[in-house]
Amino acid sequence: LVSSGGLKMSGGTRLENANPVIFQRSGERLLTASEEDEDVHDPIDDREIFDILSINDPEHPLSLEELNVVEQVRVKVNDAESTVGVEFTPTIPHCSMATLIGLSIKVKLLRSLPDRFKIDVHITPGTHASEEAVNKQLADKERVAAALENSSLLEVVNQCLSTRNI
Amino acid sequence: METREAELKGLGADFVFGFVQSMDGERDPRNLLLAFQIAKNIIHRGYDLGKFTEELFEVTSCYFPIDFTPPANDPHGITKEELIEALRAVLSGTPKFAEFLLPLIIEKLDSDVQSAKLDSLQTLTACLSQYEHKDVAEFLEGLWTSLRREVFQTSSERIESAGLAALTTLTSCLSRSVLNSDSEDSLSTFLDLVLKDCKHHLCEPDLKLVWPSAKLLQAACSASNRASHIITAAVMPSLIDQYSSRTQAPVILIIMTNLFLSSLLCSEPMDQDNNRVASEQYSHHAVRQRCLSALAAVSTQPSIVRESTPVLLEVLSSAHTGNLSGKMDPCGFLSGCFHVVRLAGQTASRAVSLFLDGDVSFLPDNSFPSHIQLLKQGDSWSQSQMVCLLMGCVCSLPRSVEVPQIDQLLSQLEEMSCTCSHPLSYTSAAKCFAGLVNKRSQGDSLDSLIQRTTKRVCSELDSTSSPVRTQAFTLMIWVAKALLLRYHPLSTALTDKLFSLLGDADLGAMAADGFSLLMSDSADVLNRGCHADVRIMYRQRFFSENSAKLVQGFNAAPQEKKPNYLKALSNIVNKLPKQETVLLLSLLLEALLCPDQGVQLSTLSCLEPVLINPPPALIQQLEALVSRLLALICSSVRIASLRCIHALSRFPEHEILPFRARVLRALARPLDDKKRLVRSEAVQARGEWFLLGSPGGR
């Protein structure tokens, strides 16, 4: 559809993956006593990042979690070192939405985490034909920033990141 | 015998022998009465029976059971009952007769004649209270077989209850035995017999033997602590299993409850030696506590509570006599129960006469002092706190049921609530008073009562050095609530007093909290479940009549008193539908500046729903609102504040867009808050503000 500043995207209006496999949503995180204790510090953990990533899929009325595009086991955060890494698995190996999905994840993290964090988003190795190219785009700060200046792209990203009415 | 006892005793066993010979064959009832009297004296006054014990027994017991019909027009008026009593006094007079008497009783219990059965059972009960376990040990099986038969195959209620009483006495007798390492424990041997025959019937609740079995077990349970421990331990586990799996649950429930109640009732005198008593007492109290908690859990059925009411009133009487420690808490339990179940007027009038007049006549097994004073504090608050039971009882009655002696009751309750020093007691008295006032019918007597109470309460409150200011305050607030609910015009005097107290040095904060009490639903009194007179929209009415007063008071108050006004306001406003909140927006915004955390929190929680559909007035105040909310996002009320900022994102876009950059910047900091809950709110809020005014956003 659109490409700008180096981020290449292809894709028509037709849904590529009309019948995805659906995975069950995990339950709500349970509250612990220490989480209610004002004096105790709760470090940022993988589950917390995973919960932040409850993002819509651009093609489906389902979330990325339900499509198993993001899984908690592929989220790694280190609060003390201010690093977070997310591997995501596109629904099919030629999914043209891969870049968009990766971008949405990156943006969501940028908006939700303190400035100190270094954010790494990449495709689960071996799950996509163009993973190297996509990973390179996602890792490039300037290209990401420029992409977000594009209002059509931003629009799609924002749609992914909007909370749905359940 | 009256005058020459020493000489007669000096004759030794010969005297007894002589007496036996002269009594032999006597048939005239007048002579028999006299003879029985003499025999009784011989036994009770310690005459030496020598080797004539059996003879003495024979010559008297041959008349047992008494079968006597007085002739018509009998000039002497001797009744069968007199003879029975007199003979019983002889036969049960000494354990020396046990070896002869017990077989006799067992034999006579076999008779088909009802009166013979009854006499046997009653005589048995009489003698067992004197006997030791060694006197009965060899007869246990025979006695149990007979008693069991009388209850299982009973045709008469009198006989059944006599049989149960005999079982209780027998179990008590066995419980009195002192255990040492080489003696057999006759109590547990006996209870094994009982359990063997009764326990399995409890597992068949559809067969008719379940009730007699249950009654027998209860009778044994109520004899002593040890017995109740043994029986409940043996029986409860299987009952509980059954309860959860059976369709006959109500039956099981009633059985369990009755067993609990019997355990509670056993009033064993605590005059044994120290060590054993201390630990037994402790575990006994613990068991009672557990019984009560269990009873609270199972008492959801009206039939059960009806059964337990007289027994529980007895429990509270035990508290008076000091048999229970102050740790008991029947209050919560009973208040809860009575709240659920509608009580008939009869129970209420019993409760009232118990509390007002100390009338214990209706309590079962009445051995309590006849003049309990439960509405006076006296020495122990364990007694005065029982007023909460009274409250549970009389305040949940339907309005159609008249509470007897109500004026006297109200007067004593008022006195107690104003003078008692124990918080639970004076608060319960105040609540009880209020509950009654709320339902009292309109008219001059109600009005003059209210005026008197108001005057008393206000004069105590006006005197800052009064020792009962808190008590007066408590009474005031509950009465105010009672009147407010029913739209009574005299409520204003009390609520005005409450407003004026917001500036009081000692009671100011309590007054602010008092508004919460006025507006909230109370769980145990003055609610619809208790048939209280609650008019619709009373909160809105109160608010609309008083909001101006509140705002004025706030404006006029010195800075350090303003938090009380704000707290009062937020307590009121919290309970109102949100349209009303809108009227007080300026005040609420002002409240956000207040350094008091409680005020901040209640203001924020008031504000949040208003922000969902903001009125135009609020939109004009956006700058103030945003600044003040942002100022709070790192404070102790940051979660509430973040939620408000999240809600703000729903405002009309063109109004809040100017604030977007500032909010996004400010929200960066709570993203790194040490608490996850805070971070989570911040993430959501910030995410929404990002989408604002952005393509693809909302």
Image (spheres, coloured by chain):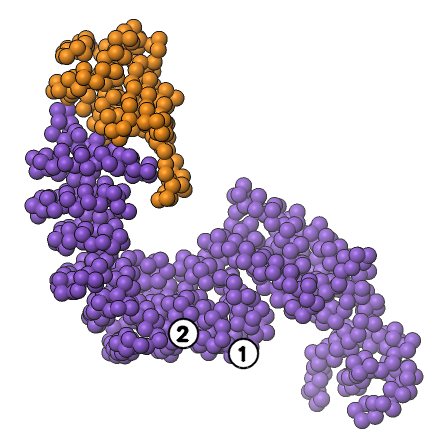
Chain colours: A orange, B purple
For numbered disc 2, what is the local secondary structure?
A: loop
* Residue B508 position in % (x across, y down): 26, 65
Locate residue A122 relative to residue B342 in the image: left or right.
left
Mark 2 crowdedness (10 Å alpha carbons): few <14, some 14-19, many ≥20: many
Location of mark 2 (residue): B420
The quadrant where residue B211 appears: bottom right
Look at discs 1 and 2 and give the one toward the viewer: 2
Q: Are marks 1 and 2 in contact (CB under 8 Å)?
A: no
- In front here: B564 or B630? B630
Earlier sequence position, callout 1 versus callout 2: 1
Q: Going by the picture, which residue comes out furthest to the top?
A: A129
Instruction: Please state, as top left, top right, bottom left or bottom right, where the N terminus of chain B lies in the image.
Output: bottom right
Q: How far apart are marks 1 and 2 (CA)?
A: 23 Å
Location of residue B287 in the rendering, given as x and y in whole percent from the top left corner: 58, 57
Question: Could you tell me if residue B210 is visible in this image?
Answer: yes
Rendered location of residue A127, percent (x, y): 33, 10
How many other residues sit within 10 Å of disc 1, few (<14), some (14-19) or many (≥20)?
few
* Amino acid residing under circle 2: Cys
